[in-house]
Image: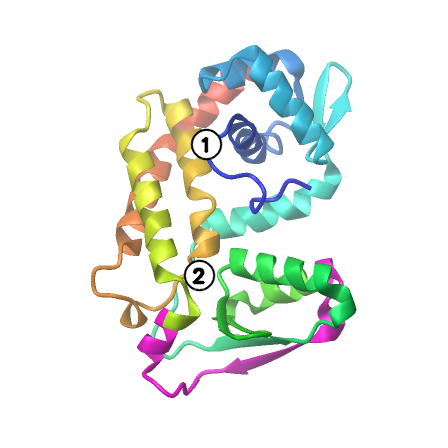
Amino acid sequence: MLDDIDARPGSTTSLLRTTIGLYLRRLGGSISSGALVRVAGDLGVLPAPARTAVTRLKQKGLLLAARGGYGLNPAAVRMLERGDRRIFHVRRMQAGDPWCLISATIPEARRDLRHQLRRRLQFIGAGSVAPGLWIVPGYLDDEVEQLLDELGAREFATLFRTEDPRPATSLRAAVAGWWDLDALRAEHLRFQASVDALPDDPFAAYVRLIDSWRVLPYVDPGLAAELLPADWLGERSFAAFADLSARLAEPAWAHVRAVTT
């Protein structure tokens, strides 16, 4: 399945995946091939690359062939709903909020599972405290449970909940070691640069906004401001997304309805 972890923003496949995630459920779960190509064209994607991207999305299991077009794979709905929660309902820690610790001991014979678990935990915003020990804000514990179940790794993991982690240094200094804040800063800079380059057309602007944004609320877990550098860029990114998405969402949806009717 083509999850958010697999499709980096900006590519033709990513733009089509974002469009499908935004609108196909609202359109009843299916779309004609002609309408999908027209919608892709409104994003600046030519028909041939659009059809290639659609084929890739079918191979990944996001789309199914349907009479006259394409349908959303029912198996993808849970993934898209999880993405909705992350993308459109950003949560932020406050000082004193609880943490969730994940202790995972994967057998040596299951190195593939160990790699997948590390990759997925990093993508949902987990910090690495030590080998086999991860930390996330407490409000992500349900998502961690779901991830462990999906990977078949629940039997190898123990979860702990605490409101008072006590590293040898200050908690703020420890956070700077548990998370790669330079990489997170680079993601915020990438997103802010993409905002400055949005087209004037509301539909194209909205899809490209969501496509550029959707990775950020995964990799940035929303740490409390007291634990981050004073010049942290997160608030600027969150404010820009909230403002633009509120202004562009309805005009973009009106365009999709007009094209697909």
Left or right of 216 on screen, residue 15: right
Q: Amino acid at mark 2?
A: Pro
Left or right of 210 on screen, residue 24: right
Choose mark 2 or mark 1, whichever is in front: 1
What span is colored magenta in the figure?
149-176
Residue placed most toward the observer, 79 or 258? 79
Instruction: Residue 10: give its label.
Output: 1
- In percent of width and height, residue 167 lies at 40, 85
* Residue denoted by label 2: 221
- In percent of width and height, residue 141 lies at 57, 69
Q: Residue at x 78, y 67 (%)?
A: 109
Q: Residue at x 35, y 38 (%)?
A: 246
**Judging from the image, what secondary structure is the residue with disc 2 in?**
loop
Specify the farthest residue to the left. Answer: 231
Measured Cα–Cα span from mark 2 to mark 1 = 22 Å
Q: Residue at x 71, y 71 (%)?
A: 106
- In percent of width and height, residue 213 lies at 42, 42
Q: Amino acid at mark 1?
A: Gly
**Residue 30 appears in the picture as rendered:** no
Query: How many neighbours does mark 2 have within 10 angstroms: few (below 14), some (14-19), or many (20 or more)?
Result: many
Q: Residue at x 34, y 58 (%)?
A: 182
> Which quarter of the image is occupied by the N terminus?
top right
**Residue 21 appears in the picture as rendered:** yes
Residue placed most toward the observer, 153 or 38? 153
Left or right of 78 on screen, residue 131: left
Left or right of 77 on screen, residue 139: left
> Which quarter of the image is occupied by the C terminus?
top right
Would you place residue 189 above or below residue 58 in this image?
below
- Magenta span includes 123: no
Q: Earlier in the sequence, mark 2 or mark 1?
A: 1
